[in-house]
Structure formats: C-alpha cells, structure tokens
Image (cartoon, rainbow, N blue to C red):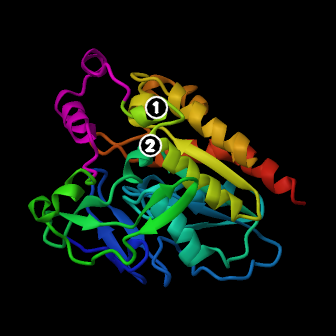
Amino acid sequence: MRQVYEYHPVIGYRFIPHLKARIAHEGGGYLLKTNEAGFRSERQFSRARTPGVRRALIFGDSFTAGDAVSNQERYSDLLEHRVADLETYNFGVSSTGTDQQYLVWREFAQDIEHDAVIIAVFVENVRRIVARYRPHKDASGRERLYAKPYFTLAGTRLQLHQVPPPAEPISFDELPAQDQAAVDTGGRFPALRGLVTALGAREVIQRLIRYQPLPAYDSPGSTGWQLMRAILRQWIAELDMPVVLMPLPLPQHLDEVCDPGPYQARFAEVAAETGCALHDPLPALLAYERTQRRAFRWETDIHYTPAGHRAIADSLVPVLERLLASRD
C-alpha cells in the first residue's frame, strides 16, 4: 500500500511533499500530485498574488482534497475554468476535521495573499471535532488509531490540546479508559456503507434508516455544534477577506432519506452571526434527476466522482463571482 501522508506536529499529518503517485480505486485509479507545502496541487503556493489574477483559498477534508479523482477534476480546480481571472489554492487534507482545517489555515495559509476563502465543511465533521483519536490505515494496510489535535471550550474560549500529537499509532486496548470514548470510528457510517454496497437498494435503506444520522445538529446547544460554532466563529473572525461557508451534505441527504433541515439551520445561524456568505449546495444538487445525483458518487466509495465535482463547482460559481465582484 502506497504511503501518501507524513506526520505533522500541528495538524497531525499532511500529504508527503513533492509526491506523484497513482492511487488504485474502483474508478480505475487516479493521479495524486502534491506541491512542496504538502498539499494536492499542480502549482507551488506563493505568498504574493499573481498580477491580474484573483485568488481563493479552499479548506476542507477528503471531499475537497479530492479523494478518488485526479487533481484537475476537483471542484477547486474546475472553478479556475469557470470564474474569470481566478486561481485556487486547495488546502484540503483527507480525513481531517474542521478543527484540523482551521489549524491548516493558521500554520500554512494566513500569510498568503488572497481575495476570498471557502470553508467547506462535510457535515459529518461535527463528529470528528470532538474526537481525540481517529482510525487510519498504516503503511501495511492495518487500521490503527492516531492521535489528533483537538479543541475544547472553556466558557466561550477555545483551548487547543494534544499539539504536538503523538506520532506513533496505538490500538484501542492501549488507550487509557478515559480516552476510549474519544475515538471516532465514523459512528454508524461504516455499517451504512456496507449495507449500501451489499444491497444497492434505496428502498431498503429508507425502510431501515429511521434516525437523524448527525443528532449534534438537532439543537444549537449540543456539545458538538457548540464546538463547531466556536471554531468557525474564531476562524472567520481572523479572516479579513470575504468568506464562503459551504456545508457539504451526506449521501443520505442527496438520496433524500434523512432531513437536512437541522444542519442547514445551524450553518445559517453561524453565517448570520459572522456575516459570511453561506452557500448550501444541496438545493442545487437536488435539482438534478435522481439517477444523475447517484452518479455524483462512486458505486462503493461515497466520495465525489468527476460529475459530483462538476456539480459542486457549478453551484459555487455565482456565489464566488458575486463575492469577488464586491471587491472590485
């Protein structure tokens, strides 16, 4: 198994810099290329803007980093062809939470000149930010637990912990008892993915799934949402350029088997509090025919196909154009 990540003392890990690798995948494989900073990009990240070109910085997890597609097929790269005089810097890091993505901003991006910032939050991140350990496969393909940086709330103040995180993976049994509850294994998502793969029947899923997959969004007072809200508020407050906050839906939301209303309400609240631009792509995605929507993700992998990235890019274009025009 090809190792594509290396340890980082603040974020936990990043892509290995200057990497070029072909990654096996159900779609036939994809090309992963990184720059000297350790992010997937065809270009180096320079501090100064390119003369005559506007720049957007984009943050997120694997749905933004582009798992399962080559660099040029990602929504970030497609935006460059759809918005005039735009270049994008994609700081996405697979399998990270919004807490780690905020640290990516602080560690790598805050001194880079830019005209806009897009914070893409795969809505499952509300689980990841309360975790202190997450499972990843090591170089041999064995699943181990890796420590991650995390924040807690002391009143309204964020406190950062576990930086630097321990570099060596451990097993669940090696964890102190008080930390075993702080392991995020994806909750009910692995079972759901297995069920979808085995049965491939939307009707079966509709019969079996009668729950809110992310209950942390049900109440503005929930622990997970309070932490997410605090991270986003602090991050956006540190940005002096226009910000687009973009929640990315679960596959279940695209399949219309669970209610997106709770997460939509929470992100609308934080956008109103911070004054940032909220872009919810779900309505635009639901405007496609059901068979088209199903083609936005792979057969067994929930990540976006090239068609999914195109749909996200298309939904973002008018939002980004309005935001950039406000600076002209």
Mark 1 near mark 2, Cβ–Cβ under 8 Å?
A: no
For badge 1, the amino acid type reads Arg
* Residue 281 belongs to magenta span: no
Front position in the image: 68 or 279? 279
Local packing at callout 2 (Cα closer than 10 Å; few below 14, some 14-19, many 20+) is some
Circle 1 sits on which residue? 293
* Residue 198 belongs to magenta span: yes
Front position in the image: 156 or 195? 156
Does residue 128 appear to the left or right of 325 in the view shown? left
Q: In the orientation shown, which residue stands out farthest toward the right?
A: 328
Between disc 1 and disc 2, whose residue precedes? Answer: 2
**Above or below, 293 relative to 52:** above
Q: Secondary structure at mark 2?
A: helix
Circle 2 sits on which residue? 223
Can you say which quadrant of the picture contains the C terminus?
Answer: bottom right
Q: Is residue 65 visible?
A: no
For badge 2, the amino acid type reads Thr
Residue 234 image-quadrant placement: bottom right
Give me the residue at 49% from left, 80% from top. Answer: 35
